[in-house]
Image (spheres, coloured by chain):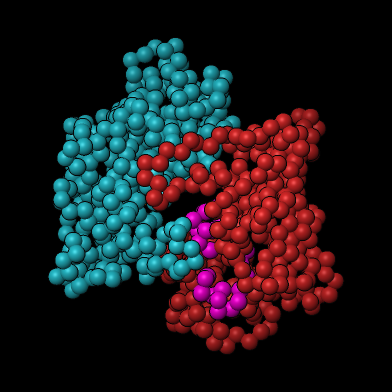
Amino acid sequence: MRDMVKVEKLCREFDVSPPWLNRVIEGKSKAILHAVNDVSFNIKKNSVYALVGESGSGKSTIGKIVVGLLPPTSGSVEIDGVDLFHERDKSKLNSTRSGIQMIFQDPYASLNPRWKVGGIIVEPVEARGGNTKGLAEKLLEQVGLSALDVNKYPHEFSGGQRQRICIARALAAEPNLIVCDEPTSALDVSVQAQVLNLMSDLREEFKLTYLFISHDLTIVQHMADVVGVLYLGRLIEEAPRDILFGSPKHPYTQMLLEAAPKLDGFGREVAPPKGEIPDPINPPSGCAYHPRCPIATDKCKAERPEMTMKDKTRVACFFA
Amino acid sequence: MNNMGEIVLSVRDFGVEIPTRQGILRPVDGLSLDIARGKILGVVGESGAGKSMTGNAVIGLLDPPAHVAGGEIWLNGKRIDNLNRERMRKIRGKEIGMVFQDPLTSLNPLLPIGDQLVETIMEHLPVDKKQAMEKAVAALDEVGIPAAAQRIGSYPHEFSGGMRQRVVIALALCAEPSLVIADEPTTALDVSVQAQIISLLKRMCKERGTAIMLITHDMGVIAETADEVAVMYAGRMVELGPVRDVLTSPTHPYTQGLMASTPLAAKGNKRLNQIEGAMPRLDNLPQGCAFHPRCSIAKDKCKINPAPGMDLNEGRAACWFADGTKQ
Ligand SMILES: Nc1ncnc2c1ncn2[C@@H]1O[C@H](COP(=O)(O)OP(=O)(O)OP(=O)(O)O)[C@@H](O)[C@H]1O
Ligand SMILES: Nc1ncnc2c1ncn2[C@@H]1O[C@H](COP(=O)(O)OP(=O)(O)OP(=O)(O)O)[C@@H](O)[C@H]1O
Ligand SMILES: [Mg+2]
Ligand SMILES: [Mg+2]
């Protein structure tokens, strides 16, 4: 199958230096944070690629770059053969862009409270001058709400229903790629199931491709075809879902899977993981995970392992 | 619940009311539960189910206009729900420790953490300043703050989120309380840090015999941590029992639906079970059992009569039909 998304050597830096005056007075130097560092991955058409990792690992930054909300510092993102940041042909670029939609974590913040639901849903299509007659009604029914809801306001809906409205709005643009950033983190478990099922159904119906961002491994295991694990802005392991969950190769992935609470883990005693995520502004030398890694050697301190293919897994560890 | 050893916390037929213009809301209603020494009771439920209200009521920290509306709370054989503010303030800290989701709500940003610990220790234990300082270092050491003696002068903002939560736990435990109320203590933390905090709470519970009420919406955390679990829905407890029983063979239709809707490892790509609809708001509770509009086995009786109370010694679920007799 063809690739829908090709992310190549993606880097994104943020200048987090203290203000110029403070630098002078306190003798501090410039500080650059590498939020995303040399990340490459492909997403096959009609598949779900999940990015997992702890807070600050760069998941949302990658998501924003892929939908074109944030430019990369270097590297490229190709969507369906069009280079998002280097393509010169404006019309080609526009049609590619409108085929990418994003769903955010917070369904409360992402809906304008003063607009009626119908208006919210068709807004992206209207902005392009498209035909919106009956569109909102149709989409509302597709996401399991009622056509009569077009005249209601967002506050009249529960969290799960609002997330459906966000999904309906994303669908209005007839996307082929949807980037979901923690789409169910703000939802309760019983409502989360409604939204995840809907996303699976829509994937079949509209042949959608998903970039699915989450820190919740149980959801990722349920939804993803391929999983990429990020640590401090770098991809450190990538494998098809069952292989990643069945035999994780990177010690960090192993730790993550081990530490995640299990529904059948009654009385389970885990040796708590060592240490915490290091300061992203001054990451450790060599492999960034080495200070917490149980099998790290001097080599890991000095040298950074590249992503290499081992069976069906790409992994960045000398000892995987 | 009979042979569980020394009961630390006992709540009986307890309720909380909030008077509003639309009428009286009951965010907690008819709640009864026990926690024994050295045991962890998990309290789970969806957002708005009344978990925090329950925890806050036990420690006497309800925000007005919410107030206690009947029932009893007993701590180590003493009734505490009718104490005045001052007596209750003494009990908090000394006999009940508290850990909240945001560690910053429990810490004073302007005071070094050592001073905060010393203050709490001296208020509740008969020690002098020097002994209190030693105890403070020991407490930080115990919760895994590296180089505790050096960090004692640090301010809260100099610690990471996980470290701050450790400091809060040290603060909650330094006066050696018999009960700790932990309200979503790991919700804001990463998986690896969560595992560290959970392991710490379990160790405290085992080594000191502290009883813990662990409030969370994460079933996985409950499975690994709790001895018993109480499931709340719309202000009522709908199921209570040993954690393994409730999670692997739930009897209330809500708990059954909840467990089935959780993405479980083995299920792969199959569809998740859905409970249609959402939990009703308190100002819009349906008549009868609050769960009946979403319940797949609801009968006419459920639409008229409130769900039956839970007999602490026998039934596990507040449901007319939970025992399988589909009358
Ligand atoms: N606009 C910005 N300015 C400065 N730093 C930023 C900015 N956006 C993100 N960062 C930093 O980049 C890193 C990656 O952030 P990102 O939001 O991508 O992480 P994440 O994996 O989505 O985390 P979370 O799970 O907390 O959402 C973090 O260290 C963050 O502080
Ligand atoms: N002052 C108030 N007036 C009206 N309703 C209130 C007030 N304070 C709280 N409530 C309601 O009381 C109910 C119980 O709230 P509580 O904070 O105990 O929920 P919770 O189970 O802890 O939820 P969460 O998981 O979101 O923390 C909620 O429905 C809330 O809306
Ligand atoms: Mg993010
Ligand atoms: Mg709460």
Question: Residue B150's x, y, as percent?
Answer: 57, 19
Please, is residue A235 above or below residue B106 in the view?
below
Tell me how many marks there are.
0
Which of the image's four quarters has the N terminus of chain A? bottom right
Q: What residue sits 24% from the left and 36% below the top?
A: B36
Question: Residue B141's x, y, as percent?
Answer: 48, 23
Per the picture, the main secondary structure of the magenta-coloured stretch is helix
Which stretch did the figure color magenta?
Answer: A199-223
Is residue B28 shown to the viewer in this render?
Answer: no
As rendered, which of A35 and A38 lies closer to the eye? Answer: A38
As rendered, which of A148 and A196 lies closer to the eye? Answer: A196
Instruction: Give the drawing colour for chain A.
Output: red
Q: Which chain is cyan?
A: B
Question: Residue B229's x, y, as percent?
Answer: 30, 47
Farthest-out residue, front: A311
Question: Residue A91's x, y, as percent?
Answer: 79, 78
Which of the image's four quarters has the C terminus of chain A? top right
Q: Is residue A197 magenta?
A: no
Is residue A103 shown to the viewer in this render?
Answer: yes
